[in-house]
Amino acid sequence: MNAIIRWSPIRDLADVHGSLSSILGHSLKSGTSKQEASSPSPDWMPVADIAENETGYLLKIEVPGVREDEISVMVTDRLLTVTGERKLEEGEGVHHRLVERASGTFARAFKLSANVDPNSIEARIRNGVLEIHVAKHESAKPRTIQIKSE
């Protein structure tokens, strides 16, 4: 008897991902390699934009649904690291029918250029977007040179 099987591109993509993960030695559930099972990896990665002007850099990282106290911004040497967690909203009697938004821990790391002042870094959340301002050193900012006549 022949059965009709409905084609699901998502299922096919998951099958390909599973095959690649087993080839590369990664677990789908934990996100860690079999060799590095002790070091957890993030569950998802928020998208980011980086803009530059004369005075510094502006990083915008989308973290909707994540509270300020669930995010950490750290600078070590010239590495800016943003970590946090978005929790799946659960409540008594709540049964999720569809969950498309990623949840769990996240992490992003950005290498800062040598022309920035790490002590100038400021961060704030506005409308679900984490904005991180990084100022350039005064010596890195453009300046106009006065031309003298003889």
Image (spheres, grey):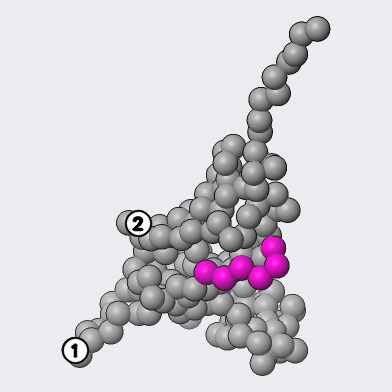
**Residue, x 30% and y 79% (percent of image)?**
89
Q: Amino acid at mark 1?
A: Gly
Q: Relative to 120, is 142 on the left or the right?
A: right
Tell me where residue 42 sits by quadrant: bottom right
| Percent coordinates x, y for residue 131 in the rendering | 45, 56
**Residue, x 32% and y 56% (percent of image)?**
127
**Residue at the disc numbered 2:** 126
Q: Mark 1 or 2 closer to N-term?
A: 1
Tell me where residue 15 sits by quadrant: bottom right
| Percent coordinates x, y for residue 75 in the rendering | 61, 68
- Can residue 13 be seen at all in this image of the molecule? no
Front in this rendered view, residue 56 or 102: 56
**Residue at the disc numbered 1:** 93
Span of residues in magenta? 73-78
Q: Amino acid at mark 2?
A: Arg
User: Counting other residues with Cα less than 10 Å from the Cα at mark 2, is it few (<14), some (14-19), or many (20 or more)?
Assistant: few
| Percent coordinates x, y for residue 102 in the rendering | 43, 71
Q: Is residue 93 above or below residue 43?
A: below
SS type, badge 1: loop
Q: Relative to 120, is 147 on the left or the right?
A: right
User: Counting other residues with Cα less than 10 Å from the Cα at mark 1, is it few (<14), some (14-19), or many (20 or more)?
Assistant: few
Look at the image and say whether residue 77 sits in the magenta stretch.
yes
Q: Is residue 138 above or below residue 19?
A: above
Front in this rendered view, residue 43 or 17: 43
Tell me where residue 34 sits by quadrant: bottom right
